[in-house]
Amino acid sequence: MHQFKFNSFFIVTLFILSLSACKDNSAPEFEVWVPYDETGIIDSSADNASERLRYQLIQSKVSDRNAIIETITSQLNGFSKEMYVNLTPYIFDQDITSIQNHIEDGTLTYKSLTQWYLFRIADTETNKDLALNAIISINPRVVAQAEELDALQAKKQHPIYGMPILLKDNINTKNMITTAGAVALMDNQTEIDAKIVTNLKSHGALILGKANLSEWANFLCDGCPNGYSAIGGQTLNPYGPRTFDTGGSSSGSAVSVAANYAVAAIGTETSGSILSPSSQQSSVGLKPTVGVLSQEGIVPISSTLDTPGPITKTISDNSIVFSAMATAKSGAAVPWEIDPRADLKNLRFGVYTSYLEDSLYSRALEDLKSLGAEIIEINPKPMNFEGFTELLSGDMKIDLANYLKAYTSEDVIVKSAADVIKFNLEDTLVRIPYGQARFEGIEDLNLSEEELQDIRDNLYKAGLAYFETPMVDNRLDAMLSINNYNAGQAAAAKYPGLTVPMGYTSEGEPKGLTFIAKPYGESDLFSYAKLFEQNTNYRESPKKYSN
């Protein structure tokens, strides 16, 4: 592994920054958050053509935004608006390699990098016209941890070192609350990091905070808005707040990446929960092969299908974060470098005939053809999803109880899905404004373990057949989809998927081209998608959040 180089200019810059901080060690002040009247917004959404955009609440009735801002301002001593503006060209929309180069030449430190993101979050989330409700909590020690990394740079071996990362708030983080967006887990102070967090930290990643999500990873209410949780409120899409769906359930993670709240974010997916919000926020999202990344210490839906995965602005960043998530520093290294390709010659991609009417999809296929790829039209037989919901309900009934028993303290009074249902019924307007139909379905389900296993086996076979038949018959290297259109089939088959921005509709809504490959084909996906990304550069920052 290569070490990063440092020079005397870096040391001089640190000295200058420290002198500047001594001159003015005050923290910037932000607007005190006062809840606003959202009645008009809610009323105007009632007739929206999309059920997912019909809101009951925008602001959380549970969380104190000013407490989050206080956690930020307490870590911004010596950091000013002027510093934020001056550092913006070196951080905003920059990839990890570029940021590390700015660290090496002394333009940035890990401390100033972290403070820039904190300032941006506070400055945006206290502005009623811009707030995206993407953040649930902030690490109260992240700046101190960044300073420690500044002092230990000789030990840096992985490019994730010193990079501030946001975690979806269903991922256990030591000394932070992990809520899954639910009031029932407001006091879930976990003592052990999730395995992927341990791995990230071992390589030097900084955990900046926790991102909002669709409550219980989108397995609470039926048809409710993506990105809503009782703890975090309604996450909004920066490309069209209250106009475009955020996708879910890793909504806050993807929104945070698009809005430049962190270098990268971590999401989780059972069926579409990384691919959907990543596509909707014009971001790169990887849903890995199930089992490649550990589920340990993550609030579950289904141990059969769940997986964490990275959300980033670029393919290269995604590969870097995936590498750091996969193994601890002491383990066998997962490479982050992507195999370079000059073209896509001799590669065959299957494309859905039914999607060809989508102009962005058709344009992306022409882009791939220009790079040498052969495009093969396919019309796979529809997959039989019988038992899919029952599998999720049956798994969650078991897996959630196991999580609550293994990780939660006595402060968390719920120990099963049934307990959560009863708890929520004590204050339905605050805790479940959209109901809890999916949780009720968990309790209504009565399947033996043998019956549940039969469903697992049948769905897996159906998923494999859905992909293997056209891929084998047509000698395909990958299949190409849109957003999360085929996430359910990929979930059943445990296939990996990688979505990359492919442009915007005439209304400005982002869309993603999603590459799907055989299990353990992540390196191939990165290679294909990087060449597409490099030759198209379709991603644009959301205009309202571009300064």
Image (cartoon, rainbow, N blue to C red):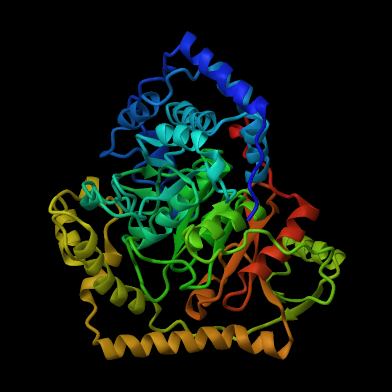
**So how many labels did they put on this image?**
0
Name the foreground residue: 84 vs 537. 84
With respect to residue 191, does 393 lie above or below?
A: below
The answer, for residue 21, to whether it is visible in the render is yes
Identify whether 302 is placed above or below 426.
below
Viewer-nearest residue: 471 or 128: 471
Q: Quadrant of residue 192?
A: bottom left
In the rendered structure, the answer to whether residue 220 lies left or right of residue 119 reads: left
- What is the x, y in percent for residue 208? 43, 40
Question: Quick one: 539 or 60, which is closer to the camera?
Answer: 539
**Quadrant, the N terminus:** bottom right
Residue sitting at x 35%, y 65%: 296
In percent of the image, x 49 and y 57: which residue is there?
329
Vertical order, 495 against 466 (above or below): above
Quadrant where the image shows the C terminus: top right
Q: Position of residue 269 (x, y in %)?
A: 45, 64
Q: Residue at x 45, y 57 (%)?
A: 199
